[in-house]
Image (cartoon, helix red, strand yellow):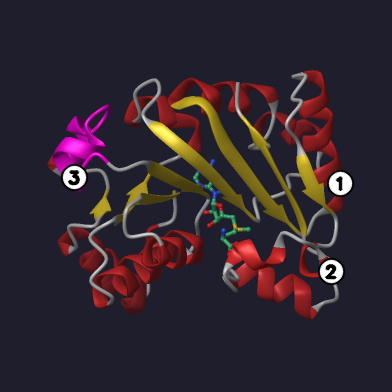
């Protein structure tokens, strides 16, 4: 492992805002995020596949009365968001290092109030369909941990992934869908507070349009 990665992993072990294997909270936090970590009763917002956690930190800064948890399997990516949240003194921001598949291990039914999925891996191969994080199995898990009526947001550059997600939502008979295939020239743009993620920058620089949708979970 490179020296830089080792340093980041050491920092994650020290930083209380990173919940990961080996820490007490990792085993205990299910259903108790408000009591054991945030110590308030505020709504909980997740960013799935958060990478460096641009939304987790950006929304956390803009919404001090909500709690934000960035989730990713890669510790060196989470490190960036964790450091930034600490530097900004954001006590309403945490990062959970785990697989999205394992959400039910960390969240109780109805514990979550909102979910953001930001530039997920598109998994274009048919054999990887079960790993696409908007497939029906994942959607069911999101609705299990969320309060009824919670909003799920998806932002992606990838049109086939976006179309696939729309098909899934149609099958699930979601009726509250709002969407745009060109976020930057849409009425939804202001709501994003100018937050852009690493992958968003990469793809917009290459000329891709940003697709965005949101709907209420049932
Ligand atoms: C394309 S990157 C996007 C990162 C960030 N949201 C952005 O927009 O810059 C996808 C991220 O999802 C994470 N990821 C993919 N599949 C995952 C899974 N099953 N569980 C946890 N994290 C996952 C990867 O580690 C990676 O950081």
Q: Residue at x 73, y 31 (%)?
A: 176
| Element carrying mark 3 | helix
Residue 138 percent across, percent down from the top left: 60, 28
Q: Nearer the viewer, residue 57 or 10?
A: 57
Residue 132 percent across, percent down from the top left: 68, 37
Q: Residue at x 37, y 49 (%)?
A: 69
Q: Which residue is tagged 2? A: 208
Residue 63 percent across, percent down from the top left: 39, 60
Q: Residue at x 32, y 60 (%)?
A: 64
Is 54 rendered above or below residue 145? below
Q: Residues within 10 Å of mark 1 (few under 14, many from 20)?
A: few
The tag earlier along the polypeptide, 1 or 3, is 3
Q: Which residue is tagged 3? A: 37
Q: In terms of image quadrants, where is residue 113?
A: top left
In front: label 1 or label 3: 3
Q: In terms of image quadrants, where is residue 46?
A: top left
Q: Which residue is tagged 1? A: 160
| Element carrying mark 1 | helix
Is 215 rendered above or below residue 204? above
- Magenta includes 199? no
26 sits left or right of 168 in the view: left
207 sits left or right of 66 in the view: right
């Amino acid at each position: 492992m490179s020296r830089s990665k080792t340093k980041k992993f050491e920092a994650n072990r020290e930083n209380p805002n990173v919940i990961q294997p080996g820490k007490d909270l990792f085993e205990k936090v299910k259903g108790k995020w408000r009591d054991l970590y945030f110590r308030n009763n505020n709504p909980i917002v997740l960013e799935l596949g958060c990478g460096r956690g641009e939304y987790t930190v950006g929304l956390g800064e803009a919404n001090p009365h909500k709690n934000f948890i960035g989730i990713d399997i890669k510790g060196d990516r989470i490190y960036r968001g964790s450091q930034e949240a600490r530097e900004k003194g954001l006590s309403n921001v945490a990062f959970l290092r785990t697989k999205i598949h394992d959400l039910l291990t960390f969240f109780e039914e109805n514990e979550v109030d909102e979910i953001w999925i930001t530039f997920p891996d598109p998994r274009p191969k048919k054999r990887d369909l079960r790993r696409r994080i908007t497939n029906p199995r994942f959607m069911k898990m999101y609705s299990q941990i969320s309060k009824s009526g919670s909003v799920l947001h998806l932002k992606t550059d990838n049109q086939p992934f976006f179309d696939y997600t729309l098909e899934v939502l149609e099958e699930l008979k979601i009726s509250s869908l709002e969407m745009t295939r060109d976020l930057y020239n849409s009425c939804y743009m202001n709501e994003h507070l100018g937050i852009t993620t690493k992958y968003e920058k990469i793809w917009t620089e290459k000329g891709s349009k940003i697709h965005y949708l949101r709907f209420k979970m049932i």
